[in-house]
Image: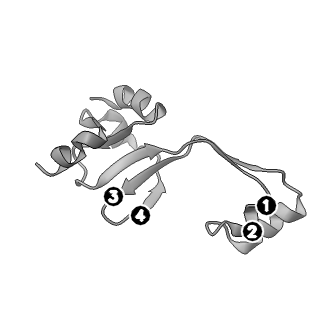
Amino acid sequence: MTFEEALPILKDGGIITRNAWDSHTVVIKQNTNVVYPDVFPKMTSLPEEAKALFRERNMEQIKYTNQVIILNTHTGIAKNYIPDWEDLFANDWSHILLRDYDRHFYH
């Protein structure tokens, strides 16, 4: 399938991948999430200076929206994902259903 066909799947919470990638690489859209000030100090993903800035500015919340990650399911490494031209024009996108995951990647 094309990227244009895969994008609605991703928007709806589905998992997508390209056949050209290794068998552990998938793309996932993270859910919108709101983080409130009582959680800021506990966030291990933020440096202390960022937390200090949030306190100084009296921020009421951080709202994470429209974040897409590329995840290696073998290593657990997740990175921000922005498709490049090769990905945008590829015709080898697939929708991964959990029930078919092993069969799709380990046939």
Instruction: Please name the amino acid that badge 3 sits on.
Output: Thr
Instruction: Please name the amino acid that badge 4 sits on.
Output: Ile
Q: Tag 3: Cα neighbours inside 10 Å, few (<14), some, or many (≥20)?
A: few
Instruction: Identify the mark nearer the N-term, 4 or 2.
Output: 2
* x then y, percent, for residue 90: 28, 36
Q: Tag 1: Cα neighbours inside 10 Å, few (<14), some, or many (≥20)?
A: few
Instruction: Identify the mark nearer the N-term, 4 or 1.
Output: 1
Q: For numbered disc 3, what is the local secondary structure?
A: loop
Query: In front: 53, or 89?
Result: 53
Q: How many marks?
A: 4
Instruction: Identify the mark nearer the N-term, 3 or 2.
Output: 2
Q: Residue at x 63, y 69 (%)?
A: 44
Label 2 belongs to which residue? 41
Q: Tag 2: Cα neighbours inside 10 Å, few (<14), some, or many (≥20)?
A: some
Asked if marks 3 and 2 touch (Cβ < 8 Å), the reply is: no
Instruction: Please name the amino acid that badge 1 sits on.
Output: Asp
Alpha carbon separation for disc pair 3 and 4: 7 Å
Tag of residue 38 = 1
Instruction: Please name the amino acid that badge 2 sits on.
Output: Pro
Tag of residue 77 = 4
Tag of residue 73 = 3
Asked if marks 2 and 1 touch (Cβ < 8 Å), the reply is: yes
Q: For numbered disc 1, what is the local secondary structure?
A: loop
